[in-house]
Amino acid sequence: MARLLGAIRRLPNAVALKSFSSLTRRIVLLNLAGMCVLVSGILYLSEFRAGLIDARVQSLLVQGEIIAGAIAASAQVETNAITIDPERLLELQAGESYGPGEEGFAPLEFPINPERVAPVLKRLVEPTGTRARIYDRDGVLLLDSRSLYSRGEILRFDMPPPTTRKPNWFERAWNKLKTWFERGDLPLYKDLGPNNGKGYTEVVEALQGQKSSAVQVNDRGQVIVSVAVPVQRFRAILGVLLLSTQGGEIDAAVAAERLAIVRVFLVAIAVMSVLSFLLAGTIAGPVRRLADAAERVRRRTRQRVEIPDFTRRSDEIGHLSGALRDMTDALYSRIEAIESFAADVSHELKNPLTSLRSAVETLPLAKTDNSRGRLMEVIQHDVRRLDRLITDISDASRLDAELQRQEAEPVDLTRLLNTVTGVHNDVVRGDEVRVKLAFEHAAGAGGEFIVPGHDSRLGQVINNLIDNARSFSPKGGEVRVTCRRLKDAVEIMVDDDGPGIPPHALTRIFERFYTDRPEEQGFGQNSGLGLSISRQIIEAHGGRIWAENRPAETKARRGGRKKARDAEAVARTDTEADGPRSAGARFVIHLPAA
């Protein structure tokens, strides 16, 4: 029993969950709810009922005038003589005439004979199904179409009206709801007795010579329309004709019209349901597949999961699919980069650690001061190498997070390059290499040398490239930094006069921990992360960086004609022997302009 009660309590939550947990069900339910609200508004605001009542009132007025005219024509005059005063005739002068005036017609009466009017009333009213009652000038009922037999015989009109079953509580509640829904605040219709004709407002107005109408509802909520028309000949009002509709006549027409609306609504519901399922299928299905693929990516980071490709669609689902695919590719690339970085770091740290361990283990075994001195030099060299590696590794590991957290700002390369090159020229070094800076504008390009980014990181890249160029330049040489403004980009070129880059190293020079330096510079003096960090920074700024060798003729042009000819001859000889000769390395940075 307790389980049953618990299941009953959980039933509403389960229904709500099942109804709104699926995007398909939500689309269908919301569309159907909108359609239901629309149809309810149409039924509530429909003016068909009011128009039908107005039309019925006009129809009854015309019908009443016709019937009232026929009744007046069928009425009998009680006397066929007109009384003339003989004394008035004796008082007439020459040329005067005498006739009955208005006061002469006052005593004339045209009473309604029920026996003569009943057949006429039956023939005119029976086809229409309308109830007709005739009252005299005192409001007394003379005829009622309910009291007529087939040949016009008259029943006793003083008999009480036929009794009907009173509505129960459910019918009364339904009638109140229907009356409110139909916006009807109509008075309640009551069937008065045969001697209370003046209890009807419309009958009183008709006795005064005016046509009148009334709209009421009975105790079952059915609309009854009544029209009162005076029965008169000339200006004499003989009585009143009261026409009224049967209960339910108008309501049946309204119900038929609403039934037609409901039928159209059911067809629309069926069509909308099908369309909603089709629409939901084009949305919910792809979204569900994308969500399942994203869940698989979260659970299986070691194995690449393919996101469904909906990029052929030109809607939001296609954009979402493309964004998820790009995000997943970036995620896997980042994971692979982290794994590769960890492996490279582990490998690079093992070399100095192995050397350091070997030197430390050998130090107690050294017998001479010279041997111990050499071992101490090895230990100090390895410690410095470890310090450089750890510093560069720490800088490379936090570089991505730092670039993501900081907002890009306009960077003035003119000021930045002047500062970096000025520091290099002011610091005295043993290589005596000078750094030269130049700014150029390409043909058709204008504007300032401003790019969006981070000035400290861009300065780090320029500093790394200048340090790299100085390390390969001969003593007393020159490093040239050229900044060119293109149409929609800025290029920075760093040239040196060194031996150039070997062809096999052009594709590997930006790899982590890769070094290819002359033997005289010593082993372990560089961590091999400078160019890798530079590429990482430039790509984070939306740019590109690459290395290339300058041809030898560029260097020869800086000398005289004789030197140029000699250099050309040497270059030609070297080209025939070993391929094209390099006149130095060049690093190019391409950044989008602000």
Image (tube, rainbow, N blue to C red):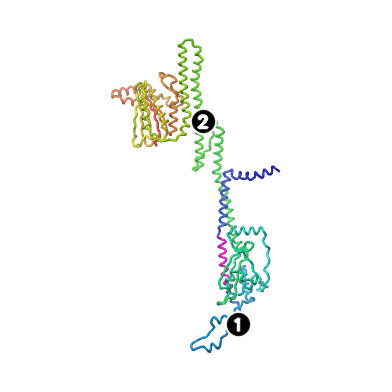
Q: Quadrant of residue 435?
A: top left
* Left or right: where 108 falls relative to 461: right
What numbered label is drawn on residue 311?
none
Task: Please say whether residue 375 is one of the residues in the magenta stretch.
Answer: no
Query: Dot 1: within a 10 Å radius of its alpha carbon, few (fewer than 14), some, or many (20 or more) residues?
Result: few
Principal SS element in the magenta part? helix
Residue 413: percent from left, percent from top: 38, 32
Outermost right residue: 1
- The residue lying toward the viewer, choosing from 494 and 211, is 211
Q: Is residue 160 left or right of residue 575?
A: right
Q: Nearer the viewer, residue 256 or 387?
A: 387
Write the start and end of the magenta stretch as one range.
47-66
In the image, 298 versus 86, the foreground residue is 86
Please tell me the numbered disc located at residue 335.
2
| Rendered image: mark on residue 79 | 1
Q: Quadrant of the C terminus?
A: top left
